[in-house]
Image (tube, helix red, strand yellow):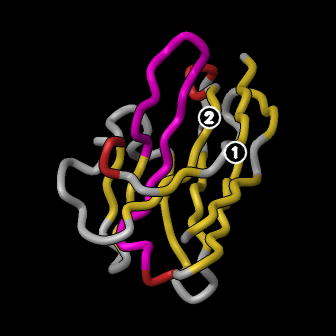
Amino acid sequence: QVQLVESGGGSVQAGGSLRLSCVVSGNSYDTDYMAWFRQALGKEREGVAGASRYGNTMYAASVEGRFTISRDNAKKILFLQMNSLKPEDTAMYYCAVVSWGLRRTWYDESQYDYWGKGTQVTVSS
């Protein structure tokens, strides 16, 4: 079993930065692929960024160049550095894990085995 707890969300003005963290507890062997998703009010959840245990990363087009995903496998933490934030980045951000073997595109949430409860990010103009 793996438990995920996100933190680091908050309210910032447009152009500001936030750093999200996701602490993993349980068997870290079961964290082959990790990702951040987000869901804005009235919208479907979408993939933001993903990272393999070997450091390969993927980004949604809307955040590429502004967000950076990273993971510390030793400390079992997933990060999302968010710079140049925009009002459209406002959402609940979730951390998710594929235990072993990414089977479809990284943003296909149906393959993720574990999810955190989320942390709210609000960007004002």
View extreme (right): residue: 11
- The residue at the point 37 percent across, 62 percent down is 98
Percent x, y of residue 99: 38, 68
For residue 118, which quarter of the picture?
A: top right
Q: In this view, does 46 lie above or below 75?
A: above
Percent x, y of residue 72: 55, 79
Q: In this view, does 124 lie to the left or right of 49?
A: right
What amino acid does circle 1 point to?
A: Ser
- The residue at the point 36 percent across, 73 percent down is 32
What amino acid does circle 2 point to?
A: Leu
The residue where tag 1 is placed is 17
Query: What's the CA distance linking mark 2 and mark 1?
Result: 6 Å
User: Which quarter of the image is occupied by the N terminus?
Assistant: bottom right
Percent x, y of residue 87: 63, 21
View extreme (front): residue: 1
Residue 55 or 4: which is nearer the viewer?
4
Mark 2 element type: loop
Residue 44 or 50: which is nearer the viewer?
44
- The residue at the point 57 percent across, 89 percent down is 74
Q: Residue 85 carries which label?
A: 2
For residue 56, which quarter of the picture?
A: bottom left
Q: Is residue 28 above or below residue 123?
A: below
Percent x, y of residue 39: 54, 27
Task: Decide: few, some or many residues near mark 1? Use Cα within 10 Å; few <14, some 14-19, many ≥20.
Answer: some
- The residue at the point 44 percent across, 72 percent down is 31
Q: Residue 4 carries which label?
A: none
Q: Earlier in the sequence, mark 2 or mark 1?
A: 1
For residue 124, which quarter of the picture?
A: top right
**Region of the chain picked out in magenta, as a range:** 30-48
